[in-house]
């Protein structure tokens, strides 16, 4: 059996292989770069916010803003075309303060402060349209005397003792503010008035003009003396005397310099009861 071989024509053309997609890949990369550049340019600016504090009309501002600040009346400000704050608040007639309408109906939940009876303002709250006293328990101290009380006189004790009592007093150092306080010599003793006076050094001493121990002791040129323990006791009136002992030249024509026994520990924390002092006294 004879087999024949068919030969291909010599002039047959070969098919070209398809080109690589290089150009297509480059195009896609360029598009990605363009998109990225575009998104960078179109980033949104930060959002503008109203200032926390109420602005002042006429001051500079930036952006298109309309800001509201609630109060007894609504307060509105806008950033105008001239880039300054403009007060655009509507007309308002706020209600009077609550303390002026305690006899009128109120809105439930409102709070108010009533009269102060010595322990702070009375707290009030509106319940079902009526002001209700929430209660303030206290025992205020009694009022201070209108005039400076005499040192050593008893203090009122019915509802406690007065506090923070200050008075202007004329002294040799000029007008001076002194405090009157209630003190107890012992737990079982009654409270008595005591003066607290700032010390001073007057140019012209006036010891005879001081009527209390505290006023006298505050003047460093004076001393308060009372008779001490002696047998027989010294007879001289308790009162304010010059701090320095007298001599035969320092007393006036109506007095003489006399040696007395005084209590050196009066009003002080010591135990002695007798000490010598030379005072100008009537003969």
Image (tube, rainbow, N blue to C red):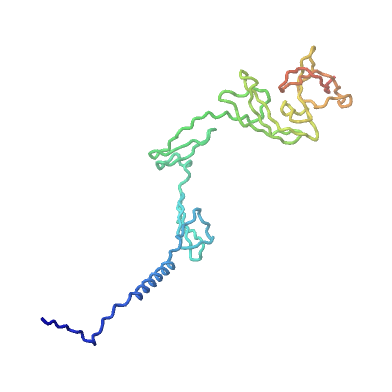
82 relative position to 270: left or right:
left
26 relative position to 84: left or right:
left
Name which quarter of the figure residue 174 lies in: top right
Picture layout, residue 78 above or below residue 9: above
Picture layout, residue 77 above or below residue 198: below
Which residue lies most toward the front here?
Answer: 1
In percent of the image, x 64 and y 23: which residue is there?
A: 192
In percent of the image, x 73 and y 32: which residue is there?
A: 199
Between 254 and 187, which is closer to the camera in this rendering?
A: 187
Between 282 and 270, which is closer to the camera in this rendering?
A: 270
What percent of the width, then of the height, locates residue 9?
21, 86
Which residue lies most toward the left here?
Answer: 1
What percent of the width, then of the height, locates residue 33?
41, 70
Which residue lies most toward the right here?
Answer: 249
Which residue lies most toward the bottom here?
Answer: 11
Between 40 and 159, which is closer to the camera in this rendering?
A: 40
What percent of the width, then of the height, locates residue 112?
47, 40
Q: Quadrant of the C terminus?
A: top right
Picture layout, residue 78 above or below residue 103: below
164 relative position to 27: left or right:
right
What is the number of callouts on the image? 0
In percent of the image, x 86 and y 22: which residue is there?
A: 257
Q: Quadrant of the N terminus?
A: bottom left
What percent of the width, then of the height, locates residue 272?
75, 18
Name which quarter of the figure residue 13 lies in: bottom left
């Amino acid at each position: 059996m004879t087999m024949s071989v068919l030969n291909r024509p010599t002039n047959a053309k070969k098919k070209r292989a398809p080109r690589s997609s290089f150009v297509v890949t480059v195009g896609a990369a360029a598009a990605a770069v363009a998109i990225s550049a575009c998104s960078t340019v179109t980033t949104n600016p930060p959002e503008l916010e109203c200032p926390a504090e109420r602005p002042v009309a006429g001051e500079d501002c930036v952006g298109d803003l309309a800001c509201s600040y609630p109060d007894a009346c609504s307060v509105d400000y806008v950033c105008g075309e001239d880039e300054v704050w403009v007060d655009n608040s509507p007309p308002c007639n706020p209600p009077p303060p609550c303390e002026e309408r305690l006899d009128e109906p109120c809105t439930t939940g409102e709070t108010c402060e009533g009269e102060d009876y010595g322990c702070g303002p009375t707290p009030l709250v509106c319940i079902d349209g009526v002001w209700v006293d929430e209660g303030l328990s206290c025992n205020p101290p009694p009022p201070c005397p209108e005039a400076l009380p005499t040192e050593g006189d008893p203090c009122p004790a019915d509802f406690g003792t007065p506090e923070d009592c200050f008075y202007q007093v004329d002294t040799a150092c000029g007008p001076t503010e002194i405090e009157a306080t209630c003190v107890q010599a012992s737990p079982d003793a009654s409270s008595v008035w005591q003066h607290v006076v700032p010390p001073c050094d007057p140019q012209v001493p006036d010891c005879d003009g001081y009527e209390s121990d505290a006023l006298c002791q505050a003047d460093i040129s004076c001393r308060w003396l009372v008779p001490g323990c002696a047998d027989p006791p010294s007879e001289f009136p308790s009162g304010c005397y010059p701090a320095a002992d007298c001599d035969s030249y320092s007393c006036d024509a109506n007095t003489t310099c006399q040696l007395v026994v005084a209590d050196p520990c009066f009003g002080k924390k010591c135990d002695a009861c007798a000490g010598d002092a030379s005072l100008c006294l009537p003969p």
